[in-house]
Image: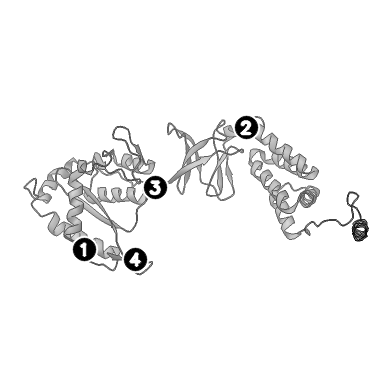
Amino acid sequence: MVRDPVTGKYRRTRLFVMTLGYSRKSVRLLVFRSSSQIWAELHEKAFRRLTGATRVVVLDNLREGVLSPDIYDPTLNPLYRDVLQHYGAVALPCRVADPDRKGKVESGVGHAQKTPLKGLRFESLEEAQTYLDHWEARWADTRIHGTTKRQVAVMFAEEKPVLLPLPVEPFRYYQYGERTVHLDGCVEVEAAYYSAPPGWIGRRVQVQWDTRHVRLLDPRTGQLLREHLRQTRGRHRIQDEDRPQKTPLGTMQLLARADRAGSQIGVLCRGMHREYGEIAVRRIQGVLSLAKKYGVASVDDACAAALEMGICEYRFVRRYLERNPQLPLSLRQVDPLIRQLTLYRDFIQDKTKESET
């Protein structure tokens, strides 16, 4: 039990244990919560504490490491897979509901829960980890193991030279997800837009991104489709070979909708498309959404003002409408299709008199 710095209350922690198969040398780490990145970082910390990486990692089928459990062909979490590949290790998930396949680490987990940590409370995670490390060095490593009948530290000294050397640089962590390629041929990542190869409009792609790069991958094969430098919010990254040679059918239908919405709206939207190409698709959609919010007549007037000033920008139209709000439309009292109210009054009076007589 460790005091949570956010809530100030004691809460249970998660215990990560990595145990070497030959020497039974273990690395035990405490964390408050788990995620795909935290799970991968724990492996990296364990490798660096051991001053080497293992060739094989036998693990449970938890979601942070294994997306689709299968004893013969499991689907690994891509971030976890890439971290192990960076260190030269291979993951071998156990059979589902069969934890005894990795009994060496299971016994190490129970041993740590019962021996050094049972019934103790700590004021911080660092204090708890320091206590656990001290117990690991002074007792767990110096004990005579019940199965091997040898000291763990001595056997680890024999096993240590066999471990794989650590890479020079640590792994560069990234975020990942799936995105749909929109009509403009781009995918959205943190409010910035990146082009996909031609032919991918409407399809799903896997995306990886960090502070420097955005990568688009084929979801079936994992092949790299495009790699872009990170762009600021609202900006686009489009490679020249990704620009369409002719206007896609979806874009032509969108421009036709703008023409039907209003004459000035259609002219402005076509001007944006000529100037910006497929990047303007989202801006055209924005103009049409303004027509739903403010009314077609108001947006048509705003587009006319933009064209008069020679500005083909969605932002100008939006700010024009925000600063010049139009009065809401009201029902007209007089219209050729609406009869005078006096006629209805006279009709009702006549019928009332007939009923009285």
Mark-to-mark CA distance, 2 and 3: 33 Å
Quadrant location, the N terminus: bottom left
Quadrant location, the C terminus: bottom right
Mark 2 or mark 1: which is in front? 1
Reply above or below: 329 against 189.
Answer: below
**Rendering coords of residue 34 (x, y %):** 34, 53
Reply above or below: 217 against 325.
Answer: above
Mark-to-mark CA distance, 3 and 1: 29 Å
N-term mark: 2 or 4: 4
**Rendering coords of residue 56 (x, y %):** 24, 39
Q: Residues within 10 Å of mark 4 (few under 14, many from 20)?
A: some
Residue 4: image tag: 4
N-term mark: 3 or 1: 1
**Rendering coords of residue 171 (x, y %):** 35, 46
N-term mark: 4 or 3: 4
As helix, strand or loop, the secondary structure at mark 4 comes to loop
Residue hosting label 1: 131
Q: Residues within 10 Å of mark 2 (few under 14, many from 20)?
A: some
Residue hosting label 2: 244
Reply above or below: 108 against 202.
Answer: below
Label pair 4/3, CB-CB below 8 angstroms: no
Horizontal side of 164 relative to 74 (left or right) equals left
Residue hosting label 3: 173
N-term mark: 4 or 1: 4
N-term mark: 2 or 3: 3
**Rendering coords of residue 35 (x, y %):** 37, 51
